[in-house]
């Protein structure tokens, strides 16, 4: 299918919305260009969450980020979950919707995690069918995010970058490039993040995610955990700057979902992203 892509985020920094920051956000409209929320937190019929999101959307673009559709699962999509997602998107009309290259459920079991899968022809066909089903149900394009991974599969026959490229080409979806996930996965698998990004189809990227990670020291080297609980690490900022130099400015979200700091700390992270985006914009205008 060729899904609609009429909704777009501004090419600025964004922040994940946290209800505890609501009053500070409404006191400073436009402090960042957009806010992102997790879809599953807004699937109730009404109440304060929807009221806050509606107010937020009066002054800012909104991105809805799904964490429970299980697009990478071997079984069929949960049609009840997809229907709840459709109602949410119809209600709030966000500028962007994204999901993960991952699976998180099996039958009636919900695992509350984003789990990997082998990159094979079979999983490629399944994921493409799931994305086609989702985009048809929602009436719009989704963005698919590259995962943070801690294991690889011997039966994978596709490199991750080519696997994502094939999904996007076959379904018309866009890609969400999580630069922290690239760094986490490359460190864990002892590969080169720059080589990964050299092969990544940057022309298909419509949004970028940045986040912090935790470092566990193991006997054979570091294990990084995509924790979203710390500032963005310096090597991730460096990779982000290199990507933006190639792509030009893109909507770039700071994710911080655990051990949430004060709003000013998040604004400092957004300001660092903004400096990089502005620098790329100035170079292109020169």
Image: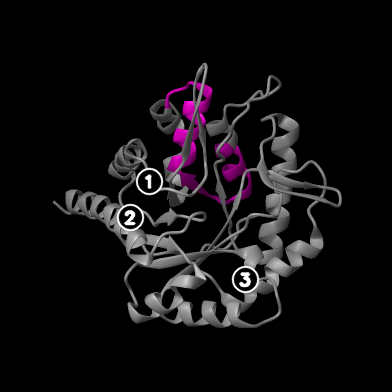
Q: Earlier in the sequence, mark 2 or mark 1?
A: 1
Would you say 133 lies left or right of 271 here? Answer: right
Left or right: residue 151 compared with residue 271: right
What residue appears at the point 66 percent right and 59 percent down from the top-left corner? 135
Report the magenta residues as a range. 164-192
- Is 188 within the magenta? yes
The span from disc 2 to disc 1 (Cα, nearest Å) is 8 Å
Residue neighbourhood size for the residue with mark 3, other residues' Cα within 10 Å, grouped as few (<14), some (14–19), many (≥20): many
Could you classify mark 2 by the number of other residues whose Cα lies within 10 Å: few (under 14), some (14-19), or many (20 or more)? Answer: many
Q: Secondary structure at mark 3?
A: helix
**Cβ–Cβ below 8 Å for labels 2 and 1?**
yes
Dot 3 or dot 2, earlier in sequence: 3
Q: Nearer the viewer, mark 3 or mark 2?
A: 2
Q: Residue at x 73, y 47 (%)?
A: 129
Task: Tell me if label 3 and label 2 are in contact, CB under 8 Å.
Answer: no
The quadrant of the rendering that contains the N terminus is bottom right
Colour style of the rendered protein structure: one colour
Asked if residue 258 lies left or right of residue 115, the reply is left
Q: Main secondary structure of the magenta part?
A: helix
Give the farthest residue toward the left. Answer: 286
Left or right of 95 in this view: 100 = right
Residue 139 coordinates in the image, percent (x, y): 65, 66
> Of the numbered discs in the image, which one, if any, rests on residue 89?
3
Q: Which residue is mark 1?
A: 232
Above or below, 176 against 124 in this view is below
Q: Secondary structure at mark 1?
A: loop
Residue 23 sits in quarter: bottom left
Tag of residue 269: 2
Quadrant in which residue 97 is drawn: bottom right
Outermost residue, top side: 220
């Amino acid at each position: 299918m060729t899904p609609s892509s009429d909704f777009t985020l501004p090419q600025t920094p964004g922040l994940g919305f946290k209800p505890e920051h609501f009053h500070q956000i409404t006191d400073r409209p436009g402090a960042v260009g957009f806010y992102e929320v997790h879809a599953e937190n807004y699937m109730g019929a009404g109440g304060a969450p929807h009221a806050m999101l509606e107010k937020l959307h009066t002054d800012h673009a909104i991105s809805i980020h799904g964490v429970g559709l299980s697009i990478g699962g071997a079984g069929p999509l949960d049609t009840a979950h997809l229907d709840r997602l459709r109602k949410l998107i119809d209600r709030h009309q966000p500028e962007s919707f994204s999901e993960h290259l991952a699976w998180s459920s099996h039958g009636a079991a919900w695992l509350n995690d984003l789990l990997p899968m082998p990159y094979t022809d079979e999983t490629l066909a399944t994921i493409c069918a799931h994305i086609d089903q989702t985009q048809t149900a929602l009436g719009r394009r989704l963005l698919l995010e590259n995962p943070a991974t801690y294991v690889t599969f011997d039966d994978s026959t596709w490199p991750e970058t080519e696997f994502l490229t094939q999904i996007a080409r076959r379904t018309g979806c866009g890609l969400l490039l999580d630069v922290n996930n690239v760094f986490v996965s490359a460190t864990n698998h002892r590969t080169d993040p720059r080589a990964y990004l050299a092969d990544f189809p940057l022309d298909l990227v419509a949004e970028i995610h940045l986040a912090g990670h935790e470092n566990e020291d193991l006997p054979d080297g570091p294990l990084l955990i995509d924790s979203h609980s710390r500032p963005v690490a310096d090597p991730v900022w460096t990779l982000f700057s290199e990507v933006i130099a190639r792509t030009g400015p893109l909507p770039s979200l700071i994710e911080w979902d655990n051990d949430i700091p004060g709003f000013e700390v998040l604004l400092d992270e957004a300001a660092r992203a903004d400096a990089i985006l502005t620098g790329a914009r100035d170079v292109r205008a020169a």
